[in-house]
Image (spheres, grey):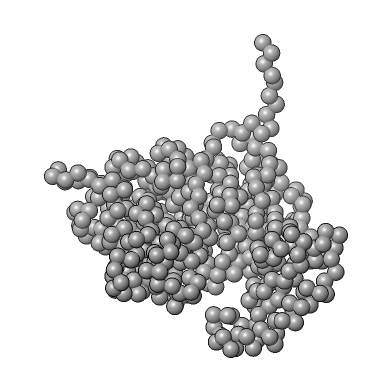
Amino acid sequence: MRASIAAETAGIPSVSVVCKGFEGQASATARGHGFDGLPLAVTTSHVDAQSTDDMVADFVADTVDQIVDGLTARPPDDDGHGPETGRTGVEPAAIETVASGTIDEITELFATREWSDGLPIVPPTRGRVEAFLAPGGHDPWRVIGTAASSGRDLTVWSVAVNAVMAGCRPEQLPVLLAVAEILADPAYGMQHSGNTTGADALMILDGPIVGELGFNHGPGAMRDGSPANTAIGRWLRLYLRNVGGFTADEHDRATFGNTFRVVLAEDMAAIDEIGWEPVSARFGHGATDDVVTMARMNSGLIIGSVVGSTPEAIVPYLGDGLARVAGWDLTHNHGLGQDQFRPLLVLSPILARTIARGDGARAGWSKRDLQEALFAAATIPARRYEALIGAWSNLTPGRRSLIDLVADGHLPDVFARSDDPDRPVPVVTDPANIVIAVAGDPNRTNAYVLANDGPHGDWTARAIDRSRSLDLACLVPDHG
């Protein structure tokens, strides 16, 4: 669709070719960029599940006529665009009353209209939303940005409406607004939030706010149950649904999908004790700042019952976990992205402490020391790497060898130290691309590793401003 949008912007008629099942997403993408109703041509079978001959035959039989019709049959409107289709029905205004009745009736209505996640909600009455906003002083109609996926404005009011539905508390609003800023940032790539692999956003919270607002960073740190962690995780999924358009009718094309991820709060006391920096520092923020950092994650796995009293003993197991979680995601090193595969390793505090403390004879490791050791330990055979990004996934153009990609400057030299097809190669392009967080049960030697979705929800951080907003303040000039 983005190629068509570029063409249409230049005044050139276009037709976008999409696979069956993606018509709704394509139409929503066009609408989000201001081009409602761009013509589509649909292929009847998935291109990766056909032989070349079958694909060509089906394309000629079913798709070519749609392309011709799209280029010749549509009457242009006054702007030169195709006819507007719009969404099904008319969207309600921001403060319009859309339902009345019992809790059960409202819950059923919201679920039927796909405004909820199917669970009971707190009805977002105007009074509740205004009460939620009142302590912060924010202008309800301030526009934070635009959802590239739907063209809808990201407003303080819409943040609050979905926050009330999710059960959030007013003091959590600054976190929600910071996340909304991330969603509005083109560097994050909100528009990819419904891609077929079903990656879901993970928010990582750092700073004094973790303790002051009661976020769980201990046992069960990534499980629902803690009100703050859970409500904000649910809010994000509702916000993506209701403002971003990530429903089955529009943008959500997840083949399987996951439920929402709760906020992962780092153990700030443990990080301070061992002398490491939080995740937020990796993305340019101060070690004691209140910050939320977000990226979309694909698959994950537990690295359980790690045994070892030294970093050297622990690292091989952690490196193996990082290598095992990396699959087609490696195309974010080259193919779908460039140097953008940055997996997350979550260490329990006892593991982090063991790595950082030293033993008297040897100094403890910094986070950078650990990243470099993991870079060397998290490897897979070159032939497997090439299969993952080429023969098995068809996501690297030309299915080129790693040696060829290094020769052309696409990957660093470490990927071509020999021509042995079984030589070990790293799963990331730089040690710093391994993101390390500290959270979880302080008395258990476990770790958790997740593969991130590269530029399709890239690592992005925002400072959290907990000061009272002056949006609605009446400032009187001082003439004295």
Furthest-front residue in this view:
407
Q: State the residue at coordinates (44%, 78%).
A: 391
Please, is residue 224 above or below residue 425 in the view? above
Residue 37 lies in what quarter of the image?
bottom right
Please, is residue 150 above or below residue 51 in the view? above
Query: Is residue 436 found left or right of 472 in the rendered image?
Result: left
The reply to whether residue 429 is in sight is yes
Q: State the residue at coordinates (78%, 73%).
A: 71
Could you tell me residue 57's position as x and y percent?
A: 64, 88
Closest to the observer, 138 or 153: 153
Residue 416 lies in what quarter of the image?
bottom left
Q: State the residue at coordinates (40%, 69%).
A: 404
Closest to the observer, 446 or 279: 279
Which quadrant: the N terminus?
A: bottom right
Could you tell me residue 267's position as x and y percent?
A: 37, 46
Could you tell me residue 289's position as x and y percent?
A: 45, 37
Furthest-top residue in this view:
480
Which quadrant: the C terminus?
A: top right
Q: State the residue at coordinates (32%, 53%).
A: 371
In this rendering, the count of numbered labels is 0
Residue 147 lies in what quarter of the image?
bottom right
The reply to whether residue 260 is in sight is no
Closest to the observer, 328 or 172: 328
Could you tell me residue 73's position as x and y percent?
A: 83, 75
